[in-house]
Image (cartoon, grey):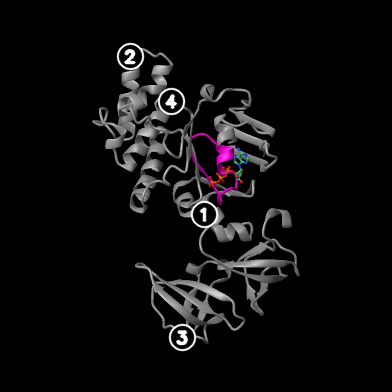
Amino acid sequence: MIVEPIIELRNIGKEYEDGFVALKDVNLEIESGKIYSLLGPSGSGKTTILQIIGGFSKPTTGSVLFEGKDIRSVDASKRQINTVFQNYGIFPHLDVYDNIAFGLVVRKLPKAEIDAAVKDALKMVRLEGFSDRDPAELSGGQRQRVAIARAIVTKPKVLLLDEPLSALDKRLRKDMQYELRELQKRLGITFIFVTHDQEEALAMSDEIFVLNDGQVLQSGTPVDIYDEPINHFVAEFIGDSNIVPGKMIADYQVEFVNRLFECADAGMRPNERVEVVLRPEDLDITTVEQGKIVVKVETQLFLGDHYEILGVDVDDNEWLIHSTNPTEEGKEVGLFFEPEDIHVMRFGESEEDF
Ligand code: ATP
C-alpha cells in the first residue's frame, strides 16, 4: 500500500539574508500519525526546517507540500500545523486555562465550545485540576504540558516540537519521553521534533532524519540508523562506536587492523577503501588465544548496569567495549565478534565524499 505523505519537502534550500546557506537540497517525507525527529548537531539546520514547515520562514528554493498541495504562500496561522517552542511561549500573566484557551478566543469560538476543548486538552496532557494555576506555580514538566495542551487544543494534524525536553532535568526528561510518545499515540497526530540528543531520538522516534551542515545525511527507523549508519558522521553521532579504516577483499571479506575478517555482504567492490564500525556492545571479552583482536586494557569504568572498557591494540587503535563482567586494567585480552557485527561503510566523512 502506498501511503501519501502528509508533509513533503522537495529540494529545499535556505539562504539567509546575510548569504549564509543553512539548508542545501533537503528532501523529506512525513507520513501521517508517526513521530519523527530531526537530529543533528548545533547549527545543522534543524530549527530552520521546522520553521519552514511551520510557516515562520520561507525557503529560498524548493517546495513544501501539505497533503499534496504547495503551502509556501499559506500563512503560519492558517496551516493545520502547530508549534511548541523551545521556551514554551507561555504567557506568564494568564492562568493555565486562559493560556490554553488563547488560540480559540482569538478565533472567536463560542464559550461553551472553548470550554469543552480546553477541558479535553487538559485531560490529554493529564493536567485536570490545574486550570486556575499561574504558570509560575508549575514545575518544568507541567509547564511543558501546558505548552503542548495549547498547541493541540486547535486540533492540528501536525505538531512541531523544538527541543521540547531540553529545559528539563535528566530524570524528568526520561519520564517526558515516555509521556510524549504515549500522547502522540493517543492523539494519533504527526509529531516532528527537533533534538540534538541521539538517545532521545532513538528512544522516541518512528523515524529519524540525521542532519549535518544543512543536509539530510540519512533517514530511517532508529534501528536502521543505529545498525546501518551510512557514513562516519552518522556512526559517530548515533551511539558509541569503534571506527577503523579497512579495505574490501571480496564480497564477504574485509581487511582491517592488518587482518582478514569474514563479514556480511556490504555491497562494495573488492579493493574499495572502507570504514568498519564495531559497536561496543558487540565486542565480547575473551582469552588472547580466542580473540580476533588483542588489546591491552587501559581503563575500566563501572556504569551501574555494565562496564565500559577501553583497550588499545598493537597498532594503537583504541577499542571501546561494553561488558557485563569486569576485567583488569593492564591485562591483555582478546576481543571476539561475529561476522554480522561488522558494519562496513564507504570511506569518507560526509555524503559529498562519495
Ligand atoms: P541548534 O541546535 O543550535 O538550535 P539548529 O540545527 O536548529 O541548531 P538552525 O537554527 O536551523 O540550526 O541554524 C542553521 C544555521 O543557520 C546556523 O549556522 C545558524 O547560525 C544559521 N542561521 C539561523 N538563523 C539565521 C538568520 N536569521 N540569519 C543568518 N543565519 C541564520
Q: Which mark is residue 223?
A: 1
- Exactly how many numbered labels are in the figure? 4
Could you say which disc has been placed on residue 20 in the image? none
Report the magenta residues as a range. Answer: 31-50
Of 315 and 8, nearer the camera is 315
Q: Is residue 240 above or below residue 218?
A: below
Q: Is residue 337 above or below residue 122?
A: below
| Mark identifier at residue 330 | 3
Tell me if label 3 and label 1 are in contact, CB under 8 Å.
Answer: no
Name the residue at 29% across, 38% down. Answer: 138
Horizontally, residue 45 falls left or right of residue 91, namely right
Label 2 belongs to which residue?
111
Secondary element type, mark 2: helix
Q: Which three-letter amino acid code belongs to the residue tagged 3?
A: Gly
Residue 338 falls within the magenta-colored stretch: no
Q: Which residue is mark 4?
A: 155
Q: Evaluate if marks 4 and 3 touch, with contact meaning CB atoms under 8 Å apart.
A: no
Q: Is residue 98 above or below residue 207?
A: above
Image position of 231 with respect to 250: above or below: above
